[in-house]
Image (tube, rainbow, N blue to C red):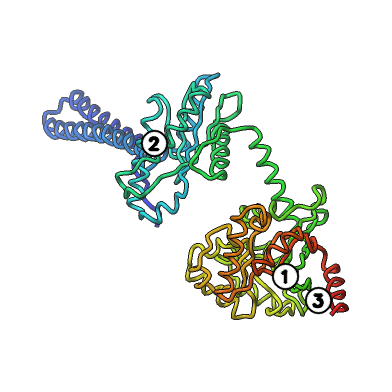
Amino acid sequence: MSPVPARQPLDILSTAAALSVMALMVVLLVVATGDPADRNLVTTIAIGLGAAGLILFRQLRKNEGGLRMSEARAHYSATHDPVTGLPTKSLLLDRMADLPDGARVGVFCIGLDQFEELYDFLGHDVGDRVIAELSRRLATVCPETDTVARIADGVFALCWADLTPAKAEGVAGQLIRLLAAPCEAASKDTVIAASIGVAFWTAADGRPEEGLRRARLAMAVARKQGGNGWRAFDPVMDSELRERKALEADLRAALSGAPNAGSLTLSYQPQINARGVITGVEALMRWAHPVRGLISPTVFVPLAENCGLSEVVDRFALKQAFIDSRRWPTIRTAINISATQVQAGDLVGLLQGLLTETGASARALEIEITESVLLSDDPATYETLKAVRKMGFTLAIDDFGTGYSSLGYLKRFPIDKIKIDRSFVTHLGMQPESDAIVRAIVEMAEALDLKVLAEGVETRAQVDRLAIVGCGDIQGFYFSRPVEAEAIDRMLARDAKVA
């Protein structure tokens, strides 16, 4: 059934006009005919028609007023944030576009650090009240002629005409202090930190969106550098962004096996015991880029994590390490996996699938994780690691001592081995603190019945120092650089002849 269309103001106006004309014609008819018999009836009809026309005219006025109010409410809702009442991104951009030609505008992009955690901790209602309170504070900073807007859930923007760079620095610092002050809507322990980007824009730079984009990019840089600070836009940021995006595209191509995209490869660094015998190898990933040459994992692994490719990279490295481990059944092959894979992915299913696919033995493999995986003390993470260990894998903590190590974590989680970070090994014999830390780690490992290995060993003096404190298992350039799998074959064959 088709809906009945609403009567439009023009329809009402036409009907009212027709009734008024009919009333006038009736009156003229009476005057023309002069028939007294019909005069009373005709007069009554004329009055009725005229009254109907008047009512319709009044209804039209009322409808027009209601329509204007509805349109005004709809426009306000579309251009103002419902929580804070501040202008939205679209209204901010419209106001920037309306500024006089040649006007130089300072654009601030203000992102609340850990915004989602704020709502998780406080709840939605209290979180909204905090956001509303912060918006009122921001509105007190800039002149009334300028605009403060909420352009995303945890992001505000401030448009300030004729702002000088010198004043912008002071304003940025003021904004950080203003947001950090305790909020009445939250507990006193709630600290609000913000990352702020500042950019300057004129109409000659293009559309207003360009000014906002620059400020947002500077905000992202401030957040990447630790947050709770500010950065001014620099053209170098654009160059670095383009570089990252190009590298990301190349990484995707390499992972997909595209021609001329280079490839990810694994090399292996031997791990030796006090007698100089190889007891294991660590798989280290490299990216052979067709133009840039070999790219270190310190470059492309964080890139993969930021663009959602870490699980793909992990799977590639795990599969190749599993395949190569079959060449060396008498030693253990170690492979590092990302925290994302442990905490968010189906690690158990992935490992089981790869064991089936490659025919590798879990007992010949070691899974290395970083201390950050243990920080959350998450029951799900515990169950995942417990299941991995039950499958036969050895579990090791990589870069031990640089994060959040504690006896509690080591006791609670099913860990077999810890690897002392190279930063402590480098200063052995030069800094008493490093010697003391390494000795404490070794003694702690012995008390907890954990194996221990020192990474980054490069000199004979470091080997001797480690032997003194009871750490005989080492890994580093002193024995060998990372090498291809074929070189490990030759090393193991040599060890077998010596034995």
The residues tagged by marks 1 and 2 sit, at their Cα atoms, a distance apart of: 51 Å
Residue type pointed to by label 2: Leu
Mark 1 and mark 2 lie on one chain; the one further toward the N terminus is 2
Secondary structure of residue under mark 2:
helix
**Residue 399 in sight in this render:** yes
Residue in the image at 39% along x and 36% along y: 178
Residue type pointed to by label 3: Arg
Secondary structure of residue under mark 1:
helix
Percent position of residue 131, x then y: 37, 44
Above/below status of 403 relative to 43: below
Percent position of residue 25, x then y: 25, 28
Tags 3 and 2 touching, CB below 8 Å: no
Mark 1 or 3: the one toward you: 3
Residue receiving disc 2: 178
The residues tagged by marks 3 and 2 sit, at their Cα atoms, a distance apart of: 62 Å
Residue receiving disc 3: 327
Residue in the image at 58% along x and 60% along y: 437
**Of residues 109 and 64, the one drawn nearer to the viewer in this rendering:** 109
Q: Quadrant of the C terminus?
A: bottom right
Residue type pointed to by label 1: Lys
**Of residues 109 and 363, the one drawn nearer to the viewer in this rendering:** 363
Say which mark, if any, is on residue 319: 1
Residue in the image at 68% along x and 46% along y: 245
Tags 1 and 3 touching, CB below 8 Å: no
Is 143 displayed left or right of 368 in the figure?
left
